[in-house]
Image (cartoon, rainbow, N blue to C red):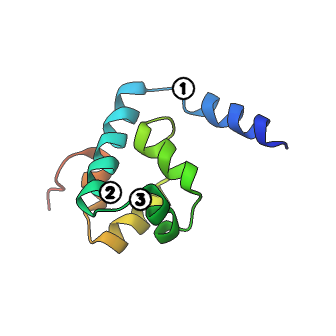
Amino acid sequence: MNRATLNIDHLERTAGNDRLRRALAARLDRAFKRAGCSSARAARWLGVREYDVQYWRRGISVVPLNVCMRLATVRHLDVHRICTGQTQVA
């Protein structure tokens, strides 16, 4: 599959719930900013491509749960809060 097809498919899969996607993007962007972390550095931490991180931070696509888990582990963050915006109740 060529790169243009991948990008089109990528955007079609993420055309759904815009409000939730943007809220997640805002939380991720805040987490990276608080860590003083660029998209390139985050990509290296997470083992993904830089443009994937940029897409997540802009709300173009949604970060996969396994990547959220890695981010939470690396930065000692609450994965539930990143994903939902709410504090987990015990």
Q: Report how far apart the C-alphas of labels 3 and 2 lie in the structure.
A: 12 Å
Which of the image's four quarters has the N terminus? top right
Crowding near the residue tagged with mark 3, few <14, some 14–19, many ≥20 C-alpha atoms within 10 Å: some
Q: Earlier in the sequence, mark 1 or mark 3?
A: 1
Vertical side of 66 occupied by 57: above or below: above
Please give the name of the residue rendered at 19% of the width and 47% of the height, measured from the top-left corner: 86
Q: Amino acid at mark 1?
A: Ala
Q: Tell me if 78 is positioned left or right of 15 in this view.
A: left
Q: SS for tag 2? A: helix
Vertical side of 79 occupied by 16: above or below: above
Q: Of circles 3 and 2, which is in front?
A: 2
* Residue annotated with mark 3: 68
Q: Position of residue 7 (x, y in %)?
A: 69, 37
- Quarter of the image for residue 70 reads bottom left
Q: Position of residue 5 (x, y in %)?
A: 78, 35
Q: Is residue 63 visible?
A: no
Crowding near the residue tagged with mark 1, few <14, some 14–19, many ≥20 C-alpha atoms within 10 Å: few
Please identify the residue farthest to the right as the structure is shown. 1
- Quarter of the image for residue 47 reads bottom right
Please give the name of the residue rendered at 34% of the width and 50% of the height, measured from the top-left corner: 28
Crowding near the residue tagged with mark 2, few <14, some 14–19, many ≥20 C-alpha atoms within 10 Å: some
Vertical side of 49 occupied by 74: above or below: below
Q: SS for tag 3? A: helix
* Residue annotated with mark 1: 15
Q: Which mark is residue 32?
A: 2
Q: Amino acid at mark 3?
A: Cys
Q: Amino acid at mark 2?
A: Phe
Q: Earlier in the sequence, mark 3 or mark 2?
A: 2
Which of the image's four quarters has the C terminus? bottom left
Q: SS for tag 1? A: loop
